[in-house]
Image: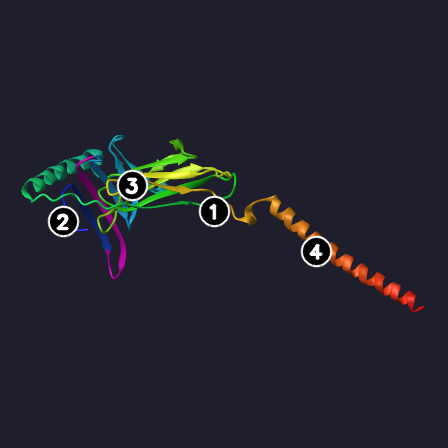
Amino acid sequence: MEIGRYLTVLVLVLIHGAWAVKYLHRDFQVFVVQDGSPDKQFDVDVDGDEVFYMDFNLKKEVGRIPELQHLVMQGGEAGVSANIAILKQNLNVCKNQSKWSPDPKFAPQIAMYPEDPVEWGQSNTLICLADGFYPPRIIMKWKKNNEDLTDGVNITEYYSKLDYSYQRFTYLKFTPSPGDMYSCHVEHEGLEEPTTVFWEPEVPEEKSGHGTVICALGLTLGIISAVVGIILLIKERQRLQAQQHGI
């Protein structure tokens, strides 16, 4: 993506690397400002994983990893917002001084899958991923049996990738039951029309419960009975043949 030609979204990445003889870790402070909603975002990534992001409504850092909930930014939300205000000014200056080009639109690739192997009646998490899209504006909604879901739903910030495209995850806590149908509805300006991906829980036969065990046991008993019947039939025929020969 030739991001340098397009100025609707301005991304500032500050890299703090720990380099010695070999690569150790690399962390990023990612500032994103753009026209439209959301108009700003800030997060810290370490080795490609988001550690925490700034919730501008709560005015505080929110950790993605429980063990790192204590981490904070120097200057806090006020400092991050001040930097974002400067970036917005820079974005407007660039737009006014450059030859304006239409914003590129790259449609997301969508995938849906469970976090753990599916077992009937066992709590699980369904994951919907939108990957490789641009600009970072997208709507992702959950449905169960064609009815909207809001309970048990969580959605991440926009994760920036090395090619300046984005990915976003949304999670649904659910308990699988036979016959249920789940779907992830995605809207993005790179798509010709909204896309819906469907998923229906399936449980392997070996995990389907007592029915499989009973069926296997019945089949085994049937085979044993047939073998015993054949042995008795052979012995009875041998006895009759012996009587006919006067033995």
Can the viewer see residue 70 in this picture?
no
How far across and how far down the image is residue 97, in percent?
5, 42
Name the mark on residue 52.
3
Task: Count residues near mark 3 (Cα–Cα under 10 Å), then give few for <14, some for 14-19, many for 20+.
Answer: many
Tell me the crowding category of disc 1: few under 14, some 14 to 19, or many 20 or more residues within 10 angstroms, Cα based. Answer: few
> Residue drawn at (15%, 35%), measured in percent from left and top?
82
Q: Which residue is mark 1?
A: 117
How far apart are the two marked residues, 4 and 1, measured between alpha carbons?
34 Å
Q: Nearer the viewer, mark 4 or mark 2?
A: 4
Q: Pointers 3 and 2 in contact (CB under 8 A)? A: no
In the figure, 225 relative to 101: above or below? below
Question: Circle 1 sits in a helix, a strand or a loop, which is it?
Answer: loop
Which numbered tag is attached to residue 4?
2
In magenta, the rendered stretch is 19-36
Q: Earlier in the sequence, mark 1 or mark 2?
A: 2
Q: Nearer the viewer, mark 4 or mark 1?
A: 4
Give the quarter of the figure containing the C terminus. bottom right
Q: How far apart are the two marked residues, 3 and 2, measured between alpha carbons? A: 27 Å
Observer-nearest of 76 and 95: 95
Could you tell me which secondary element the residue under label 3 belongs to? strand
Q: Quadrant of residue 187?
A: top left
Identity, as a three-letter code, of the amino acid under mark 3:
Phe
Q: Label 4, label 2: how many angstroms apart (C-alpha)?
A: 73 Å
